[in-house]
Amino acid sequence: MEKLKQAVKEIAYYRHQAKFSKLHLSLIPFLSLSSSLYGALLYTRQSLYRSGFFSKNRLPVPVISVGNLTWGGNGKTPMAEFIAKRLADYGISPLILTRGYAGGDEAKMLKRHLLGGPVKVGVGANRVATANLFFEKYGYVDYRGSKFFERTYLDPKMGSHVGSQKIGAAVLDDGMQHWSLCRDLEIVMINGLMPWGNCKLLPLGPLREPLIAIKRANIAVVHHADLVLEQKLKDIKLVVQEIKESLPIFYTRMTPSYFFELRNISTKMHLGAVLDAVVLCVSAIGSPDAFVRAMEKDHYLSIDLTSVTITRFNLRIFI
């Protein structure tokens, strides 16, 4: 199964079929048919939303969507966390809405990183229903426009302290294809290491939507920019601006901050603690290539089997 998954990934990201094995070539017809069916379903779904047959919901607070056009490794969840923290710094209590894929590992990570702060994390496939549960519990404040609107739902069991936790914004983690929910700001994340692959739709390629969907975005962010040659960054910028010339483009990198023990996540170890040590790196993220390159670039290693420690990464944005 792993060999099959690797073959599908190689087909998606390599353009030159002359280098493909018999396994790769045997998979291409099936993947092409599946990609065509996926494209037809995608077009039909978009048309039903555009025509109004499928209705869109609007939350009573501003909504920031963080999404992407390709499968994993684009930095959506770190960006959602980064935005939520910045909103909290400005006195706005945000709610992160995530589906909780693969057992909810990302949701658990967000809750661990944001524990004790004003940021709330809602998990569920129905983002609107999840958001409404939090609005009923904490209330909300709408800062949009000239009219200031505030509403509080108070549960007698909760006490009066709930008022200080009113939700002022929602952040959609992986929200670009969640068309049933209106948003005020659309951020598209782009993996600088592997931006578009063969430019085909899933599963023949890595695209969840055609590149023309970039037109819907208000901001583009190229992730792992520090691991990419300058010429490749220029090529990505050219593709984006050919689709939407006025789209602002920012660049991000992930930087290791410290190690912590899984058995006691409150402990912090300096990155130099494992310098020159022989340890084993373990990764379970969408873009493991970026993880490996980052470790090699900074000469740090991620997991020590004897002490079971892992690295905490922070997102850095630059223009």
Image: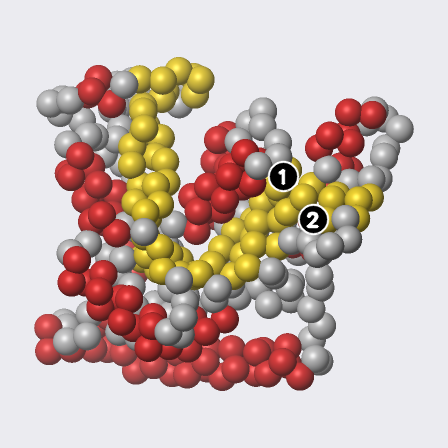
Which image quadrant is residue 30 in? bottom left
Res 43 label = none
Display coloring: secondary structure
Q: Position of residue 61 (x, y in %)?
A: 69, 51
Please name the residue that numbered disc 2 is placed on.
143
In the displayed image of the protein, which residue is found farthest to the right? 156
Q: Secondary structure beneath disc 2?
A: loop
Residue drawn at x 46%, y 41% as measured from the top left: 82
Up-down: is 166 above or below 129? above
Which image quadrant is residue 145 in? bottom right
Q: Find out whether the residues at labels 2 and 1 contact each other: C-beta distance under 8 Å.
A: yes
The answer to whether residue 208 of the structure is visible from this angle is yes
Q: Secondary structure beneath disc 1?
A: loop
Residue drawn at x 39%, y 15% as measured from the top left: 267
Measured in 3D between alpha carbons, the distance from the residue under mark 2 to the one under mark 1, in whole angstroms, is 9 Å
Please name the residue that numbered disc 1 is placed on.
92
Label 2: how many Cα within 10 Å (few below 14, some 14–19, many 20+): some
Residue drawn at x 85%, y 34% as measured from the top left: 154
Q: Position of residue 143 (x, y in %)?
A: 69, 48
Residue drawn at x 66%, y 84% as measured from the top left: 51
Along the line of sight, which residue is nearer the eye, 241 or 199? Answer: 241
Kind of residue at disc 2: Tyr
The answer to whether residue 31 of the structure is visible from this angle is no
Q: Position of residue 119 (x, y in %)?
A: 59, 35
Up-down: is 257 above or below 261? below
Kind of residue at disc 1: Ile
Q: Is residue 215 left or right of residue 92?
A: left
Along the line of sight, which residue is nearer the eye, 243 or 145? Answer: 145
Q: Earlier in the sequence, mark 2 or mark 1?
A: 1
Up-down: is 243 above or below 193? below
In this figure, what is the number of numbered marks?
A: 2
